[in-house]
Structures are given as C-alpha cells and as structure tokens.
Amino acid sequence: MLWPREEFLTAYNQIKHDSIQHGGCSILILVAMDVDALCASEILTQLLKADFLSFSLVAVHGYDDIQRIGTARFHDEDGMAREDTDLRSIILINCGAIVDVSSLFQLPMVVKCYILDSHRPIHLSNIYNATKQIIVFEDGGNSMEAIPEDGSDLDMDEFDDSSDEECVEHAVKVDSQEVEFEAQEVEITETALEEGVNDAESGETKENGPSSDKTEKRRRREEILRYYRGSYFGAPVATIAFELAQQLNSSHSDLIWYAILGLTKQFLLEQIDMDDYNLLIHFFQDEILTLEPSSTEAGTEFLEGRNLHGNPGTIAQPPTLASNPAYRHEKITFEEEYRFMLYRHWSLYDSMYYSDYIASKLGLYMSPHPRSSQNGNAYVQSGSMGNESALHVWLARMGFSLKRSQQMYMYMPLQMKTQLREKTQELAQDFGLQDLCYGSFQRQYAFQYHQSAADAVYGLQALLEAPASCIMRNLSEQKKRQSQKTSFGGGTSFPHSNLSDLLTFVGQDSASLDATTSAGTMKDDGVIAPQGTEDSLQERSETSSSAPENGFWQQNFIVAHTALSRKSVLSSSLMETGIHIAMEIKQAIVRVGRTILERKLIRRVKHFRYVSLSIPERDQELFWNGNVLTQLSLFLLSMYRASGRWLHDPHSNKRQRTSGDQSEEDQESEKIESAASKQIVPLILITQHPSRQCFLVVGVTCPPSAGQVYRNTLGTAFRLAAEETSGQFRQDGFTSAVMELQIQDIFTFIEQLHNVLDA
C-alpha cells in the first residue's frame, strides 16, 4: 500500500512499537549500492539509534541477494515457511518498488516490509497488497488517478498469450514513437492518432458489442501497460528519509547534508529534471537557514540556569571557539558550483578537460589530451602541450597561463582563484557556456577544508563501485604520499597492508557502524557473517555467484559508509581515496569514449544506436559495472548532443518545396521523414566480461537537451528480446535496462531487440 508523505511518522512509530514489543534485533535494513541509498540508510539508522533500537544493516547488489536473504530468514532447511522469526520489520532502501515484493519474500504475518525507493513505476502488487504488509513510502510525484485500479490482473498474467503479445508490442511501439516524436520536436497533432484509436475501438465494439469482455480486458491490459511504460526516477530516497526526520523533529545539519548528497547524486547522473532539482535546492536553502543558531552569530552563548541572585534565567557564557565567526565547523552553505569535475582536488586544466560539459561545449574530444599518461594515473606530471584547442584559447582569454592552470588548484595563486568566477562569467557567453554553474552546497570542516556535495558524491560512488584491486592500489599510493609519522585513530597507523586489516580497522573505528548495527553478508545458509576476515571473504567469493567477480561489494559498502561521516581522520582519508579513484574512473571513461568517437564505432539501426566496447585489459574489471557504463553513455550523449549530430536541425539549409509544389499531406510526410533522419534514439552499450563468457548490456534514453529526463523503455524491450533468443540471461539489477547475456546470444539479441521495437 502507498503510505502518504505527511504520515511517515505513523509508519516509523509502528516500526518502533514492533521493535520494542518484541525486543532484540527485529529490524533488517537492506540497502542498494548507490550514494542515494547510502545516505538514506545513514539518516534512518541515526533515527533508530536515537530511539535505542537495534537493527541489522546489509548491502544488497541485486534482487537475487534479497531473495536469498528472504529464503534464509523465513524458510527452514527443508524449504518450508516458518513463523518463528525474530524479525518484525524489513526496510528496503532504493530497491524493491519495481518488483512484486511478495514474490521475493513469503512474509510471515508478524512481519511488515517498508519500501523507500526512488525507482519507478511502483509495482501494482505492492500498492494493492491484500495483507497490508507491504508499505511503500510515497514521494508525492504520482497522483492516484494515474495509477490503475485494483484487480485480479495486476500481475498481467490473466490474459491469453495472443492478446498478451499483441498488447505488449503495441505498448512498446507507442513508447518508442513517443520518445522519437519528443526528441524530434515535431508538432504532430493528436487528432489523427485519436481518430485511429477511436476507429479501431468502434470497429471492435460493433463486432463484439458494447459490453464485450474482450474489449474491456484489452482496455484494462493497455491501461496497465501504459502505467508500466518505461522506468524513471522519483524523488531521491535520501530526501524521503529526511522528511521522516523532520516529522520526528530530529533534523540537524548532518541529516540535511546526507539528503543533499542524495539529491546531488541524481543530478550528476541526470536522473532528475532540472526544474525538480532547483525546487529541492530552494527547499534545502530554507532548511539550512532554519537551523542557523541566532545566538552564535551574536558572538555570545546563553545557557539556561540561575543567576547570582538564584533566580531562573539565562547566563551569558564567555565566547568559545564555536562562537568565533571564522570557525564554521560543519556549516553548510549554498554556492554556485562550477561544472568542473573535482577541481578542488585536481588541476584547473584537468578538471575542465575531464568535465563532460566543458569538453562537449568546446569540442575537446577532437584533440588528444596532451597530459594523458600510459597508466591513467590522475597525478601525472605536466608535459609539453600539443596543438592549441578551444580550452587553451579560453584560458588565455581569461589571462590564465597554462603552467599555472596545470598546478593543483589548492596551490594556485590566490589572485587566480579570486578572478576565476569573474572571468568565467564574463566570457561564458562567447564560448557557449551559459550553464557553467549550477546551484549546490558545500560544507566546511573547522579551519581545515571545504567539501562540495558533488565532490563527496564522486568519492562515495567510486568507493561503492570500484573493484578491490583499484581501492587497495590507491590506498597503498596514498600511504606512500603520507608522512610515516602521521597517526590515525589515536596514534594507530593506518593499516593499508592488506584488505582484511583495513576492514578490521574500519569496523573498530568510532565513525563506522556502532555496536547496535550488524553489518554483514549473507552466505548461502543465510547466516550473517562478520566482515574483515580472509575466510569470510574467500568463502563468499567462491559461493556467491551474484556478486561481482572479486566478491568485494560488501566491503565497498563498509568503506563508503565510513567515508561518509568524515568524523575522523580515517574517514577523511577514505574519502580522499575515493576522490582519487573517481579521477581514475573518469580518465578511463574519457579514454574509451574518445576511442569510440575517433573510430566511429557507434552503429545505428532504426530504433536505437549501439556500440560494442573494446576495453583495454587494464580497464576491463572497472567497466564491468552498470553505473560506469551509464557514465560512459552520458559522456557520449553529451558529446553528440553538443555537436548536433544526433539532433534534427529545424533551421536546415536544405531547400524545402513550397505549399504550391506539394499538398499538405506531402508536406507533413516530408517533415516527418526529414525529422526521422536525425532523431535521438536510445543508446545501448555492450561490453564483454574479462573472464566469464557473457556480455553486459546497458541502455539509456537520449533527451535532446541537458536537464530533461525521459522514461527508459528499454527494460521491457530487453526482457522480450532476451526471451526470444531462448538463451540464458540475467536481469537482476535494481535498474531494469541492465542485462547480462551469454556470449553466443548477443547477435540474436540485437536482432530481436530491433524486431521488438519495430513491432
């Protein structure tokens, strides 16, 4: 059932009541592996800790993991359902909404499942759950009028096979046509479409009668298929968790910061519309102003107590460090953030070059990067400059020398930093960089440093998705750069020597999971195993087929969870490591993307474009990740979108015949045909696993301009095409447009996908 946003407090009180009444650890939290889910879980766990409620926190990589956990928790060794479970509440964070949860869990009557998920559309079986055990937190994005009514056919398996295939093909065709026409920006009246539909319905009505069950069943079927038309994202789940904190009167700067990070993650991955993003930015600006302490600004703190005469009142306290205006520890401030990637941790030149926005607007992908190195390290030394590019001209127009621009940003002269914003605003129009900045936030930690929301998201996402070898290599490099005398955690040196030592240290750190949290991984027998031992790591690597090849994703979550808080030197060091890894990932994306563009490897068929990636051996493990491939597709999209190659140009110089030379029907037909020649269609990326005989396929939609979000209709099309291949496939991720296929089925899959979209 959908739980309204204004009544989140009631659902939380139910969780609290069930936990107190039963006692013990009766709350299980399953968290998806992304920054938004990580931040939402941190908000929720802080609320639970404040009420002294015990919980278990487990990261999940796909729905196979969730199903395995449910089987271990709610079934005995013989596979029979059992009611004697300690659980009372299961909380799914950024997972579970788009599937029928009752098919994943055979929930005992005493257990309720709460879903906080930004993936859409919500499965109708979760909305109309008969037992009221599945509760979906609503974000207010959909009205009940847009949701089909309850019925016995919510699973869409109550129809004949012939009508089922016909309706599915019709829905997919309508979806592809909608995306094409929106991208073309061609004005097509809906009159003809409505007339065609009405004629078909009237003809069918005449044949079968107005009360025909077949007609009603078809209408119902198409209504449900229209509701499931493509996947998209709702409000960030971290903002939903923050809404709950507000209703509990427990909001503070840490929780606001986590919610901002969840919002920023959706913005950077183009999962949220620009208008919706700006609305939430204004909302958080108001929240930050609400939490500003007025007494601290005055320079004197007042505490309740008794004065010298013994009467109740306020006692003026001497100014402290916190009352110093220069001391702004953990203060969150709004700022216009540059679209330069990680420029505070990189050189100004590199941050501009590796920015999708700057590179696409200035056409930097056409010339090789003069400072690229063979090992792809983010910390290469300055080399000789190659041919001039638009970036060189832009820097010269601003008065910044290349030598100074290639320095680390923190070491740049203060005068250059001061002039940067003025110069960029002055010259932005000349270089087509009108949207060079966007609204965001940054946080200051004492007198040490500022951290922007975008930098934190890049670092955390890198820690969540990078393979173990990449993380450990960066930790080793960071250890070499640090002084041997630097101490961590009260004099203990930071143990980078091996993975198990690092994880043991993470588990003991005060900023990581506390004693009330049981963070572990589900083994095949369903027991939550402790982290940080070589045996558990080796055992999971051998037994868990759904995990990545190195079996490191549970440790990824613990490391990222520790880095999120930045309450200790260890967490700050891990965040810096994540930022360095994000630089490496971005450099690898640009290397592969430039190869695709220079060799023109993207192939076009009628309804989509696709490219089969040839990844260098050093980067193969890195690119076996749906999120990394999505970032690569966004890079390619931004390049082609800025160049106009994938867009229909309404101001084309091609001679058009006048109305006197052709009829109105011919004019309309030629207009549509001309638009179809340069329409934006979905982009599909295909990469082969370095060791297993399978391919990873990722599909994204291609809006005509940045800031727009379209529904991704490829998830259903992938499943239908894979079923036609009669081979083995796996669509286990929380994003539907990601699939694994056997290597021998890939060509048949592409052919069948074309047939499905052309149905």
Image: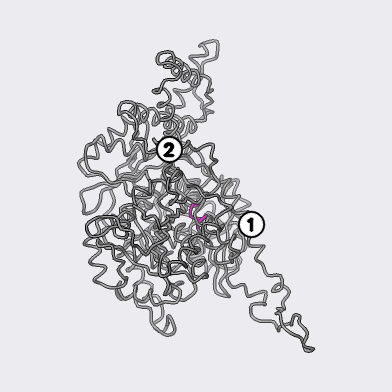
Asked if 489 appears above or below 688 in the picture, the reply is below
Q: Is residue 253 left or right of residue 65?
A: right
Q: Is residue 432 left or right of residue 177?
A: right
Q: Dot 2, how many residues are within 10 Å of its Cα: few (below 14), some (14-19), or many (20+)? A: some
Q: Where in the figure is residue 219, as x and y percent of width and height?
A: 44, 27
Q: Residue at label 1?
A: 422
Q: Amino acid at mark 1?
A: Glu
Asked if 324 appears above or below 465 in the picture, the reply is below
Alpha carbon distance from label 1 to label 2: 47 Å
Q: Nearer the viewer, residue 98 or 86?
A: 86
Mark 1 against mark 2, which lies toward the viewer? 2
Q: Dot 1, how many residues are within 10 Å of its Cα: few (below 14), some (14-19), or many (20+)? A: few
* Residue found farthest to the right: 309
Location of the C terminus (image quadrant) = top left
Q: Residue at label 2?
A: 228
Asked whether the viewer can see residue 693, the reply is yes
